[in-house]
Amino acid sequence: MTKAPTATDVARRAEVSRSAVSLVLGGRAKDARLSEETQERIRKAAAELNYRPNAAARSLVRGRTEVIGLVIRDIDLIGIDPFLLPLLDGILDATRDQGYRVLVESVRAGGGNPFGDLMDSGRIDGMIVENPNYGDKSLRRLIKAGRPVVVMGSQGIKEEVSVRIDDFQVGYVATQHLASLGRRRIAHIAYAERGIYAVDKRLDGYRSAMQKGGVPVHDDLVIHASFSMESGYRAMKKLLDGKELPDAVFAGSDAVAMGVIAAIQDAGHTVPGDIAVASVDNIDAARFFRPALTTVTSEPYACGRVAAQMLIELMNGRQPVEQNVLVDTRLIVRGSTNPIYAEVLSSLGERRPL
Amino acid sequence: MTKAPTATDVARRAEVSRSAVSLVLGGRAKDARLSEETQERIRKAAAELNYRPNAAARSLVRGRTEVIGLVIRDIDLIGIDPFLLPLLDGILDATRDQGYRVLVESVRAGGGNPFGDLMDSGRIDGMIVENPNYGDKSLRRLIKAGRPVVVMGSQGIKEEVSVRIDDFQVGYVATQHLASLGRRRIAHIAYAERGIYAVDKRLDGYRSAMQKGGVPVHDDLVIHASFSMESGYRAMKKLLDGKELPDAVFAGSDAVAMGVIAAIQDAGHTVPGDIAVASVDNIDAARFFRPALTTVTSEPYACGRVAAQMLIELMNGRQPVEQNVLVDTRLIVRGSTNPIYAEVLSSLGERRPL
DNA sequence: GGCGGTTGCTAACACGCGTTAGCTAAGATA
DNA sequence: TATCTTAGCTAACGCGTGTTAGCAACCGCC
């Protein structure tokens, strides 16, 4: 475990000053009129010593770390939320070639000034915040102060830079689809508690579609689950214990939907015969689950890519072209709402039209 | 966007020297015999200015960053591999309270010295490497040099510090379970290509169980898929096109198994009637999929926790108590191998015994 | 042979912090 | 009064880098 070589070591070996090393490796050799021969000598010495500039020292003098933070709302959800992995994937893809690294941080809700702490620690240059609680004070302050922050979802602040899908539209389309099948008692099982932008907006879309379609809205048909399939299972069970059965469920996520469907089947009902189920995300499993899930895509990978690109703009002091990006979404109809679907496909020996 | 306050700003406001600030906030006030009153003044000034020590400067002088790296083997898999999220969760849980942050890095296979580059960039103090390719030279060099590295899986180097499940045992147990059901043509669909420790060892376990059980091993019954359900679907389809059908499949992961089962059903066969399927991971969906998956747990969360704890030991210059930890695993029998299971459970109105 | 211009390089500062040796003033001791 | 001790604090160095002003040598030119 020998100490890492510094620019001084390289300088000594190449028999030049440390300044020359810094200039050459920083690509500013021309400005300093260093001879080709000297440059070559320095590069050779650096390679031989396996020299890499120390990131901390560089950050200190440059005032930037080349690291961005991905801030997760609540630690408990990291292991469960299937949205996160493709999101991270998109972020990594967009940042890698720009030379940025990604620090994953989880922030407990409530208490202190977690966002400010992280931002001002000098560890990151900017951050992407996934699904923050609506109106978080700590985050709000940061955004108002003009720091480089991209919000996934929305904080409802006019200054915010955000990326999201149109969650209202998502709720509207899914519910409308269920209503178009002639369903009248359409329940909604949200994927998380109130206060998260996406949760609230999908609920709004659901309500709006019901009203437009002339379908009565019953508040006891709205329940909040909590990310996991397990929580969806339990929520649906509660619903099934009610006086009157729903004939359709709009689930806030595919994971919740899978629990919901299991609960329905365990209770002896059929999907989509007795109860049709539509959801959101289009995770991998949606195509392979039986019945395959009718779902509205939530585009985590695309959201991650776009968010990272916008953040890089912000960190470079530029305003992104669009301040609030809406990523396109689409409805994919499969067996969980369409009984014909499965039969048609299996008779064709084909399972996945999309 | 005003500049972040430095220790000098705090010193000015508290009317003391910058040294005093550093001493007080670093908890070494007693050593320097600073009076209670002065300490209070400094703390007050720091709070008022919202002062946070700059991480880069601190790293530079301390020679440590308080950041660990989680290195993913290949960028393409991040969005897919369900093992990663609970792994990250475990790592975050174990590091958070120790004051460490986590940097997620993806490394392309082949070319350059990616592990060395990352380690010597001065950005991280140590790293956890997920599923590296067996015998990677860049990684090998780092381990041999005694740098703080924890390998998830194994590189087969005696100096390595590693955490893993007993992948041989996993393959053995799953296959033995299938054999114990009287199956004789047991196929194996690995979850990734050859050269990854877990993949190879599970295959060894599979072969060993076959031999011990007196079941003939046919090499054309072994196929390598690639993480996704889709790849499992395709692999199984290929198998189904062979001359003689298997009557059981040991799938290398739950994700692959879900694709496998879909393919089997699409071809008009039943699970577990015609073909029983056992797999590895016990992801959330395993309980809710139909048939529910018989699977051997792979304990990603526990592995992450343990790996992080061991890495912290290493970074503190201590040797961990155990150099190569094996995390316990268990077989969970569900409907994909046990036809009785589903019926019994549904008649009890209960779905999940485990 | 004095002067401006160019080439090739380096000295020196700054970034923000942790740390240690040592300074000053007051009190204790002799 | 002179010396020692102690309390309370600060000056100053070093971490490894990026950057700028400027130095020395040489050349060409009037």
Image: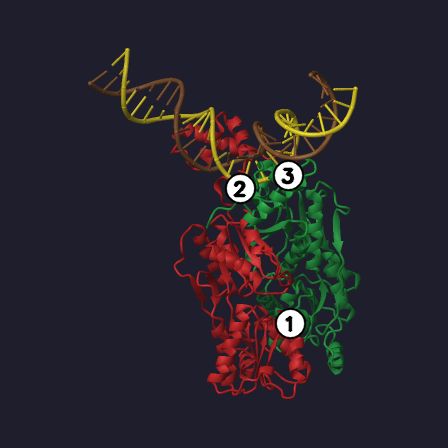
Chain colours: A red, B green, C yellow, D brown
Dot 1 amino acid type: Met
Of tags 1 and 3, which is closer to the observer?
3
Viewer-closest of A110 and B175? A110
Please determine whether, in this image, residue B334 is positioned above or below residue A121.
below
Q: Which mark is residue B9?
A: 2
Q: For marks 2 and 1, give the CA distance.
A: 51 Å
List x then y, in percent, for residue B56. 56, 42
| Chain designation of label 2 | B
The answer to whether the residues at label 2 and label 1 have Cβ atoms under 8 Å apart is no
> Do tags 1 and 3 sit on the same chain?
no
Q: For marks 1 and 3, give the CA distance.
A: 51 Å
Dot 3 amino acid type: Leu
Dot 2 amino acid type: Asp
Q: Earlier in the sequence, mark 2 or mark 3?
A: 2
In the image, taking residue B227 as reference, residue B277 lies left or right, namely right
Label 1 environment density (alpha carbons within 10 Å; few <14, some 14–19, many ≥20): many
Viewer-closest of B244 and A308? A308
Secondary structure beneath dot 1 equals helix
Secondary structure beneath dot 3 equals helix
**Residue for badge 3:** B23
Secondary structure beneath dot 2 equals helix
**Residue for badge 1:** A229
Residue B200 appears anywhere in the view = no
